[in-house]
Image (cartoon, rainbow, N blue to C red):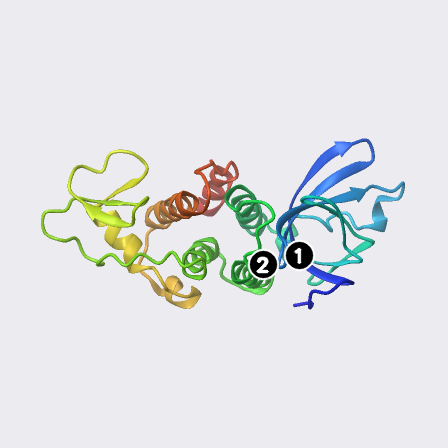
Amino acid sequence: MTNGSALHHPAIALATVRHKDGVSILKVFSRELGVTGCIVREGVKGGRRGRHLHAPLALLDLVGMKALKEELHRFDRAERVLPQDRTLAEIPRSAVAMFLAEFTLRTLDAGTPHMELFDALWRTAQRLEQGSAIGRLHLAFLVEAVGVMGLLPDARPTTPPGMERFNLATAEWESGPPVGEDYLAAEEAERFLRIQGMDFAALRAEDLSHDDRNSLVLHLVRYLQLHLSTPRPILSWEVLRTVLAA
């Protein structure tokens, strides 16, 4: 990973939003600044910055980065740290990248650094481009995010007597039926708690159906958003779910 300094600034591309003619705002996840925006001026020759330089989860070295105002920056040039040939060419990899980028953008408050989470997403982007198995990569990142953000539940992994549901907002077992998105039924909760702290290799070996995996992804997103911000829908999830089911 490129070391951050006044001249070189590691960042992960999340999304590009058109601002006005010839100018866009590139949303990035910066190791030192958290989620922030950067002015991108589109020159006459689009090839100058590269057609896909700012694609979701592109690993970038932003050279000459300077603050313009709160949560808005500019840079002299962006250099790609790792090619995204497979990530851009293969639909499943692209779908994972879009999902993780959108999750990061919709979950983290702007302007707050999360260095360990940044490092986890950087490693995930590398594995997405270079690895052979990616079907549970997004799940592995979410599990790692729970750990690095200090949100590991300390609830017992099996259902306590008299308890029927697990509350994602409080990370505690409760009595009563699991009604609503914030509550997991006992079987779902035990699966959710069992995978906490697992690394990518352990998750790959875990006996999970596609439905189990998808449910866990949604539970983890809900859990992280409840504890880090406000629950927001991840619009790219349906695309990813459909692509990985094919």
Residue 14's place in the image compared with 199, above or below, is above
Q: Is residue 55 above or below residue 7?
A: above
Q: Which residue is mark 1?
A: 11
The answer to whether 32 appears left or right of 196 in the picture is right
What's the amino acid at mark 2? Ala
Where residue 159 appears, as percent x and y from the top left, is: 17, 53
Measured from the top left, where is residue 88 in percent x and y?
A: 65, 51
Q: CA distance from mark 1 to mark 2?
A: 12 Å
Q: Position of residue 73 (x, y in %)?
A: 74, 47
Position of residue 20 measured from the top left corner of the image (x, y, whole percent): 78, 31
Could you classify mark 1 by the number of other residues whose Cα lies within 10 Å: few (under 14), some (14-19), or many (20 or more)?
A: many
**Residue depth check, mark 1 versus mark 2: number of the one nearer the observer:** 1
Q: Is residue 6 above or below residue 50?
A: below
- Image quadrant containing the N terminus: bottom right
Regarding mark 2 in the picture, which secondary structure is present there? helix
Q: Tell me which residue sits at (71%, 60%) in the image.
A: 9
Q: Nearer the viewer, residue 89 or 213?
A: 213
Classify residue 116 as left or right of residue 44: left
The residue lying furthest to the right in this view is 44
Residue drawn at 24 percent across, 54 percent down: 190
Which amino acid lies under the numbered mark 1 shown in the image of this protein? Answer: Ala
- Dot 1 lies on which element? strand
Relative horizontal placement of residue 128, taking residue 219 as reference (left or right) = right
Q: Nearer the viewer, residue 123 or 151?
A: 151
Q: Mark yes or no: residue 56 visible.
A: no
Q: Which sits in the foreground, 206 or 24?
A: 24
Q: Which residue is mark 2?
A: 125
